[in-house]
Amino acid sequence: MPTSLQKQLIGHLNLSALDVMRLFAEFAEDAGVTQCNRMTVLHTFRRIFRSGIVAVQAAEHTVTFREAVRLSLHARRHRRPSTKADLRSYTNRFLRQREFADSPIRHISVSQCRELLERQFGHSNHVFRKAHCVLHSIFTFGIRQGWCDSNPTDGIAPYPINERRIEILNLRQIRSLLRACRISRLQCMEASIRLMLWCGIRPNEVQRLRWRDIDEKEHVVYVEPQNSKTGGARAVPLRGGANWLCLHKGADDAFIAPRDWVRKWRMVRQTAKLTNWQYDTLRHTFASMHLKHFHNIVQLQEEMGHRNCDLLRTRYLNLRNLSAVTARVFFQKEC
């Protein structure tokens, strides 16, 4: 016997017996049910209808973009404070567009995402690309949660990067940098600079390292996942001027970088008269010298902590006018 809810639905549907028979005949034809008895047909239709209901419910399951942002940030709550602050600065600008923020992410289109990015971030190619990356990560998180089936940002071409000529230091400039560290108030910076220059350690990574990460027996510096930008561990050999670290090692629990590192690093550059400074110049110098001397880009990629060699080829190397002799001298104990 039909339930009261089923009787109510039957009354509202207002379908004739002929309509129902035609509908069932269409389903039977599509399902290939042509020569079965009554119970087999009913059982087949029940399975088809229930599977269809589940599929429709799954297809309609979603959350608003605002909620997706909140849960996506919560899932990354263990990231570093600087990373979380950077993510929040972009997501807050996404959420300023209330119509976009309150839309179910399953129904957000490519054109809506493009309009949001161009309106909020179109003034700068670099900022546009970063915002595109953050927005892409939110939809990717939504796909994993079953809130949407595709990522609309895949249909948006990131703005091209206008690459600048990569600057590296010559031997004279490297010597000037090291001499600047011998001024009494800047001596605390020498270890950090040697790690960046002869091991290619990122500035933010250097500030997280402690002296226990220097292994004088194995002659390497360990960059643990919690100290790495990309979250991967690596061991970088101590070569050339980095050998100095084994001879001047501090207390294991002490940070290698001093307090007020950013200001002191700026003072070192100013003292060395390196005022026109390009970000990551020391990593660029290390990468270029390494490839020129060792001719092994895969090894270089591993030591620098990159996931692949693409970034090295496009944005890190400057081999123009760099001689093999200069690279060999660079990897001697002192250049």
Image (spheres, rainbow, N blue to C red):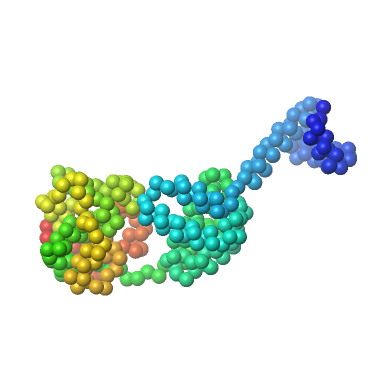
Measured as percent of width and height from the top left, residue 43 is found at 74, 29
Q: What residue do we see at 16% from left, 47% from top?
A: 251
Instruction: Give 87 or 109, whichever is nearer the viewer.
Output: 87
Measured as percent of width and height from the top left, residue 197 is found at 21, 60
Q: Is residue 4 above or below residue 142?
A: above
Q: For residue 169, which quarter of the picture?
A: bottom left
Q: What residue do we see at 39% from left, 54% from top?
A: 83
Instruction: Give 202 or 77, whichever is nearer the viewer.
Output: 77
**Is residue 117 visible in the rendered structure shown here?**
yes
Q: Is residue 66 left or right of residue 44?
A: left
Quadrant into which the C terminus falls: bottom left
Q: For residue 23, which quarter of the picture?
A: top right
Q: What residue do we see at 20% from left, 53% from top?
A: 256
Q: Is residue 315 left or right of residue 69?
A: left
Instruction: Give 97 or 150, whichever is nearer the viewer.
Output: 97
Measured as percent of width and height from the top left, residue 60 is found at 64, 46
Q: What residue do we see at 36% from left, 59% from top?
A: 311
Measured as percent of width and height from the top left, residue 79 is found at 39, 49
Q: Is residue 216 left or right of residue 102?
A: left
